[in-house]
Amino acid sequence: MRVLVVGAGATGGVLGARLVRAGVDVTFLVRQRRRQHLDDDGLVVVDTHGATALPVRAVTASDLTGTFDVVVLAVKEPSLDDALEGIEDALAPDGVVVPLLNGTEHVDRLRARFGARLLGGVMRVVATVDRAGRVVHLEPGVSVLLGELSGGGSARAQRVAERLTVDGLRVTAVDDIVDRMWAKWAFIVAAGVVTCLLRNNVGNIVAVPGGSDAVLGAISEAEAVVAAAGHPVQPDAHHAAVQMLTAEGSTFTSSLYRDVVAGRAGETEHLLGAFQTWARELDVATPRLDLALVQLRAAALAA
Ligand SMILES: NC(=O)c1ccc[n+]([C@@H]2O[C@H](COP(=O)([O-])OP(=O)(O)OC[C@H]3O[C@@H](n4cnc5c(N)ncnc54)[C@H](OP(=O)(O)O)[C@@H]3O)[C@@H](O)[C@H]2O)c1
C-alpha cells in the first residue's frame, strides 16, 4: 500500500512518522522549504521520549510521480486548494482520500473533486510544529476515525483502517463518521472559544472560580448547534469533551489558540466563523462564540 501524506505539519507529521516507523510506504507532499528541511534534518518528532529524527521521502508537487492507494490530507483549510493542485493524477483508480481537517466545511469541496473516493476522517491528537520545524506531540495518544460519508460500514473503509493501524496509531472504521466530524467540530469550537477568549490553558482556566462554568457553557453552546444541525453529540463524546476541557492541571490549549499565540495564519474562519454561520441559520444563540470571534477578528486586524 502506498500512502501520500499531504502536509508534514502537526497532524501529517505525527501520523506519517508512525507509519514510516512501521515500514509503511509513505511519501510526504510538501512545499519547497519544508522539503529542504526534511531532506536536511529528517522528520523530527518530539514527544515525552525526546526528539527523534526520521529519514522520510518528501516531494513537492512538481516532482510527484506514481499513484497512491491512500491520500491523507493534513493541511489547514486555507491551504487546501493549493495543496490539492493536480492531486487527482496521484490517486490510484481504487484509491481513497482521507481528510484529517477539523470542521466539515471542506467536505463538499472535496466531494466535488474526488466523488465516491472521498472518505470522512477525524484525527485525535494534540500536536504542533515549533519554530525549528519539529513536530511536537503535546499529549500522549493518537488515533484516527474514518468512514463512508454516506454512512454505514464498508469493506474498503475497514481495509484502509486495518492497513493504517500500526504500532502507536489506532485507525478505526466507523459507520457514523459525519456525526463524529460534527462532534469533533463542537469540541474544537468549545476549546477554541474558551482558550482564545480567556487566553489560557485549560488547567489555569478551571483553577479559578467560574472557570469550569465558562468551559461547560461553551461546550453546551457548541453542542446545541450541532444538535440543531441534526448531529447530536453522543454521551461518550460529550463526557470526553467535558473531561478534557475541565481537567485539573491540564496544559491543553486549542490549535486555534496556539496559532494565535504563534502569530500563524490559522483556521478561525473555517472553524469558528463557519460554525457561527450555521448557528445563525439554525437560530441557536452563541454569545460566547460571538465574543471570541470579535476578539480573534479584531486581533487579526491589529496584526
Ligand atoms: N494540530 C492538532 O493537534 C490537530 C489535531 C487534529 C486535527 N487537526 C486539524 O488538522 C488540520 C491540519 O492541521 P495541522 O495542525 O497539522 O496544521 P500544520 O501543523 O500547520 O500543518 C499543515 C502543513 O501543511 C503544509 N502545507 C501548506 N500548504 C501546503 C501545500 N500547498 N502543499 C503541501 N503542504 C502544504 C504546511 O507546510 P509549510 O511548512 O510549507 O507551511 C504545514 O506543514 C487542520 O484542519 C487542523 O484543525 C489538528
Image (tube, grey):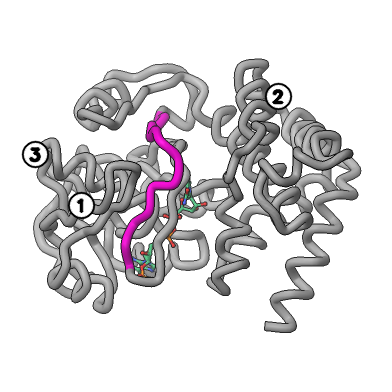
Nearer to the camera, 4 or 240? 240
| Numbered disc 1: secondary structure | strand
Which residue is label 1 attached to? 52
The boundaries of the magenta stretch are: 133-146
- The location of residue 214, given as percent across then percent down, is 84, 40
Q: Residues within 10 Å of mark 3 (few under 14, many from 20)?
A: few
The amino acid type found where label 2 is placed reads: Pro
Nearer to the camera, 30 or 124? 124
| Numbered disc 2: secondary structure | loop
Between the C-alphas of marks 1 and 2, the distance is 40 Å
**Residue contact at pointers 1 and 2, CB within 8 angstroms:** no
Height in image: 26 above or below 175? below
Residue under the point 76% across and 47% down: 278
The amino acid type found where label 1 is placed reads: Thr
Q: Quadrant of ligand 1?
A: bottom left
Height in image: 143 above or below 208? above
Q: Which mark is residue 23?
A: 3
Residue under the point 40% across and 65% down: 130
Between the C-alphas of marks 1 and 3, the distance is 16 Å
As drawn, is 70 to the left or to the right of 67?
A: right
Figure quadrant of the N terminus: top left
In the image, residue 192 lies in the stretch drawn in magenta: no
Q: Between disc 1 and disc 2, whose residue precedes?
A: 1
